[in-house]
Image: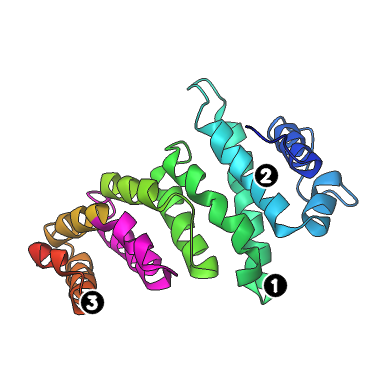
Amino acid sequence: MKHPAAPEDRLAEHLAVYYWYDKLQLDEDGGLLPYFFRSVPPAVRGHLIWFIGSAVAEWHDNVPAVVFDRLRRLLEQRLRVARESGSPAEFSAELSRFGLWFTSRRFGDQWSISTLQEVLDLVGEVDLDMSVGERLVELAPRFPQECVKALTTMIARAKEPWLIMAVQESAKEVLRIARGSGNPDAVFNARKLAEDLISRQYFDFREVL
């Protein structure tokens, strides 16, 4: 049985739509969107981030580039607020919902991988671990060092062993690509991560050395 959406989640969705249609502004004094982010619980802020990611994943190619620019600015502002708060972990329920943005393939590869790393550095996790791992495999030929770094952070911050198992096959492929990339930093860090995982008894990673 599908449960009805909470009113505050519906509000988050409406605000997201008004924002990407340029009806609301991020920095408007006394504006509704700034008030929303100041006032609602982290989980409701996270629902807004999730809703944007799920919507964008279904959009067609005719959406104007300016809409994506606006959405990038929103995420960048939320990252800045988390950094400046002194307690970025308190933003985990919000920023960890970036997974759908990353896997949507709609925000530009360079921005997406850089923003993924910043989210991981700040809050230590991101939703959709398996899908994120698969996306890292796609990006690894162009961004071997960045993908190894993101993978390393995901694994280091994993709270449960099953999270490592969820990305194991993707992780092995990213490390293989990085090892053959010719990028000295990527090669070194890929080997380092594989050796660390082997020392933690994930012996399947011997095959990428």
Cα distance in 3D space between marks 2 and 1: 20 Å
Residue range in magenta is 140-168
Counting from the top left corner in percent of width and height, residue 92 is at: 60, 63
Name the residue tied to disc 2: 48
State which quarter of the image contains the N terminus: top right
Q: Is residue 142 magenta?
A: yes
Q: What amino acid is at disc 1?
A: Ser
Local packing at callout 3 (Cα closer than 10 Å; few below 14, some 14-19, many 20+) is some
Q: Quadrant of residue 155?
A: bottom left
Front tag of 2 and 1: 2
Q: Is residue 155 left or right of residue 10?
A: left
The residue that mark 3 highlights is 196
Q: Earlier in the sequence, mark 2 or mark 3?
A: 2
Q: Residue furthest front?
A: 1
Under tag 3, what secondary structure? Answer: helix
The amino acid pointed to by label 2 is Leu
| Residue that mark 1 sits on | 85
